[in-house]
Amino acid sequence: MDFSVTSGELANQRTPCLVLGIYERRKLAGPAEMIDQAAKGRLTEALKRGDLGDEVGATLLLYELPGVAAERLLLVSCGKRKEFNRTRYLQAVTAAAQALIPMRATEALTTLPELIPNGLDRYRSVRDAVTATASAGYRYDRTKDDKKAPKHPLKRLHIWADETDKRAVATAKQAAGHATAIAHGVALARELGNLPGNVCTPSYLAEQAQQLGKDYKSLRIEVLEEQDMEALGMGALLSVSRGSRQPAKLILMHYAGGKKDEKPVILVGKGLTFDAGGISLKPAAEMDEMKFDMCGGASVFGAVRAVAQMQLPINLIGVVPSSENLPDGAANKPGDVVKSLSGQTIEILNTDAEGRLILCDALTYCERFEPAVVIDMATLTGACVVALGKHPAGLFTSDDKLAGEIGDAGEASGDRVWRLPLWDDYQQQLDSNFADMANIGGRDGGAITAACFLSRFTKKYRWAHLDIAGVAWLGGKDKGATGRPVALLSELLLRRSGELDRRA
């Protein structure tokens, strides 16, 4: 789906469908008032019939109002004006998108961003409109014949901005550009996450990285093969891939948009394309969802694409260690000891705690780039889902300033995190009689001890860990990848690049 900003006399805009927001009790504001005046009160008359409910997201379709060039008008209820916040705004935008998509109107014009919600500004209202509409329009059809797919789906959404306010138009255009790139990044992350494990293998992820490098000349792609990792001494990562016929890959995506001597931001994402648990085999129920265990890596792909499309003035490296975790004669066994790239040895007490094994070698590898900051993201622990549910990602770092940056970016993007402790008190749970550390620390504080494990490989740079196990995908009838935390990462990189300081 494409997005653009347009301006001009609203009643004269020729479009298959014009979207207008209406407050509770038929209150008109802004664009709706303009249309009502052009139609000589016919909009007010239509609303008096009571066909548009007051609940947020209710819709009503009108045809051919006199004095209005639009073929249709889609009215969307926004509830009470004083209660019109970001949550209700997103409900209204999503409801509009869901009404537009099956309408056989391949393009539409929306004015909803003009009704700036409480707590937001114009930039945010436009960004939210684009990303929410794109999310509503996403459909997975790679491996199915989607008979319910609309034959003439919405392909372009124009966002109206009042031309009498030149700054408003410029802000809307900038926001739409950023949001379109973020939406494309989220869609990429969702698509990679939704692909089945027999399609989306480590080799497939490497091919997708190479394709990104062809699509965006600002990207340089490197792929380390198993023999390269063997020569480096990545014993932890390779111990996981031994149980699979699919060779492991370490994928690096370099984006050099900043100054030559500027230290890079590094994003590291767990790319476990299928996790059966290894010898510590998972229960059969819902094991199919373990294709989503690479959503951390998918979010790195999405964030890198978004940054390349926005052409941000920043240096960025995306790192995705990728493997499968399957039971095999060569697979890790409980009690095995492996040596990591850092030289530290690890006793594997549970082969299903494999994500930290592939991440720890990738995190050590990041040292060579002398990064400004490293942020890893992984569907790492069920314990984080138990602790926080499905709403925020878990944030772990001993760097208060970095925690503040990530938290603020999460709030601004609507892709929130919640900080959990990373105290030394928990480190003793990783003690082992036979290695420098164990790969699990018991049931208590499982998400925290997993982060403590990773912290032992990040002593030489600023670092934060995001446990996204609760937010990376949905189950049940809405089963599918969410694309989180691409929006958070994109927001953070926009801020670190200084791009938001140059807002129109």
Image (tube, rainbow, N blue to C red):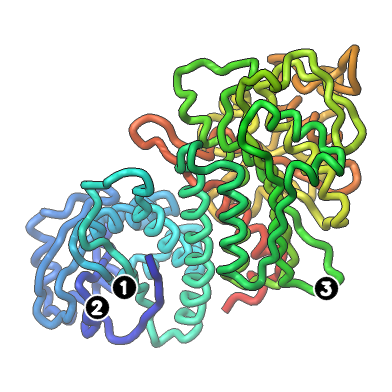
- Picture quarter with the C terminus: bottom right
Q: Amino acid at mark 2?
A: Met
Amino acid found under the numbered disc labelled 1: Gly
Q: Which residue is mark 1?
A: 30
Query: In this rendering, does residue 318 appear at all?
Result: yes
* In this rendering, position of residue 387 left or right of residue 9: right
Q: Which numbered disc covers residue 260?
A: 3
Residue 152 lies, in percent from the top left, at 22, 63
Q: Give the class, few, some or many, for how many residues have Cα within 10 Å of label 3's Cα (few <14, many ≥20).
A: few
* Residue 379: image location, x then y, percent: 61, 35
Under circle 1, the secondary element is loop
Q: Is residue 296 above or below residue 134?
A: above
What secondary structure is marked by label 3?
loop
Instruction: List the residue tagged with mark 2.
Output: 34
396 displayed left or right of 101:
right
- Residue 38 versus residue 348 in the image, above or below: below
